Amino acid sequence: MDVLTKRIVVLAGDGIGPEVCGEAVRVLKAVAQRFGHHFTFEHQLMGACAIDATGVPLPDATLDACHRADAVLLGAIGDPKYDHDPTAKVRPEQGLLALRKSLGLYANIRPVTAYEQLIDASPLRPDRIAGTDMLIFRELTGGVYFGEKGRLPDGTAFDNCTYNREEIARIAHRAFQAAQGRRRKLTLVDKANVLETSRLWREVIQSIAPEYPEVAVDYLFVDNAAMQLILNPKQFDVILTENMFGDILSDEASVIAGSLGLLPSASIGDAAALFEPIHGSYPQAKGKGIANPIAAILSAAMLLDHFGLPDEACAVRDAVENALNEQVLTPELNPTTRYTTEQVGSFIAYGVLDLKDCKFHQSNIRVGMSTII
Ligand code: IPM
Ligand code: MG
């Protein structure tokens, strides 16, 4: 077995970020212990905590450290004190967007699974969601998030949405490759009946599709996709979409899993990778020990896939599965026992050390991940 040495930069961030990140690090330490790897963890500031300490959301020291790292693990960023001031000049979110851009993290991958054990935690009907297993590929460094924005002299505001062929093609290839390793279906979500950028997405996807003849491609307008996600989520395998649509649809899709606190993500570029839960900083829960660490821990599993460590990633997913089976879960999923963030994280870390049968080896999620991250 190869022993790896890896440098992980941890951006714990704001709100519940430090709590959930702490548990993901605990689990990674358990992985290092069981498999004999050397992981180092370097903590840096990003988000509101960085603004408080340095005046900027992404200090140079943080950016440099992230560029040097083998991977970045992020908790969450954001603070309500910035949300209600439309004139604020600095915002925590600027740090995250600048980091994504600077590291070239163009592909954001968000797996959505309906866990059998939590099927009743979703407000959606169990028969509709049981068996859901999809990967959302969200473009992360283009579109309206990064287009020119501003105000005109007459007070009008604008946010431009632009995409070029290359930006579309590079994520499309990753999405097709992921589909090849899964159920071989790719759905492009766009608004091609209205938007020129969406028509370019269709053109590029149609020109790439012949390179992946075994993958069935279909096209959905985003409004319809929002409805289909709730009506019949099982129809989806890989969803490919642009930045803003992916942001919205992935929060919507989290309802299928039963809690926003369960969904991990990987943001991948050609030279860097960052792993973070899809949830936000949930400031109301800060310091209360009620935040679900599973999204952060499953993000750490994706980080292990990225390091080329499928057995290690599998050990983490099995330990999470064990926590679900034993109902060792935070109060939003199990209100009766009131396990804390730390108790759930520790239970999963012990699971990594104790559970030796790797059940997830055959799962679509693992196969899909290891081929794309
Ligand atoms: C996400 C978040 C971010 C985004 C925010 C915090 C800028 O909602 O990662 O989904 O919109 O991309
Ligand atoms: Mg979002």
Image: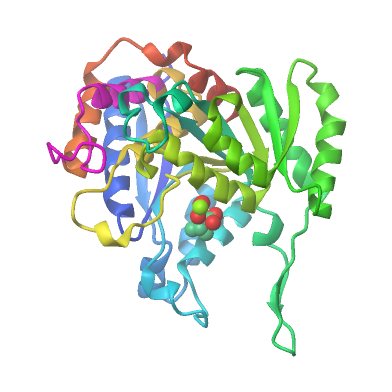
Could you tell me how many numbered marks the image carries?
A: 0
Which residue lies at the image location 74% right of the left edge and 60% below the top edge?
Answer: 161
Report x, y in % for residue 110: 52, 37
Q: Is residue 335 magenta?
A: yes
Side of 161 relative to 226 (left or right): right
Which colouring convention does the figure follow?
Answer: rainbow
Front residue of 330 and 358 = 330
In the picture, residue 80 is in which quadrant?
bottom left
Report x, y in % for residue 94: 53, 66
Residue 197 in view here? yes
Front residue of 68 and 103 = 103
Which residue lies at the image location 67% right of the left edge and 45% below the top edge?
Answer: 222
Which residue lies at the image location 60% right of the left edge and 25% below the top edge?
Answer: 235
Report x, y in % for residue 5: 42, 32
Side of 12 relative to 244 (left or right): left
Query: Is residue 84 placed above or below 116 in the rendered structure?
Result: below
Front residue of 195 and 165 = 195
Quadrant placement of the C terminus: top right
Report x, y in % for residue 278: 45, 46
The region drawn magenta spans 314-339
Query: Is residue 316 placed above or below 145 in the rendered structure?
Result: above
Which residue lies at the image location 17% right of the left edge and 40% below the top edge?
Answer: 335
Q: Is residue 277 magenta?
A: no
Query: Is residue 112 placed above or below 354 in the rendered structure?
Result: below
| In the image, farthest residue toward the left | 337
Quadrant placement of the N terminus: top left
Side of 127 relative to 101 (left or right): left
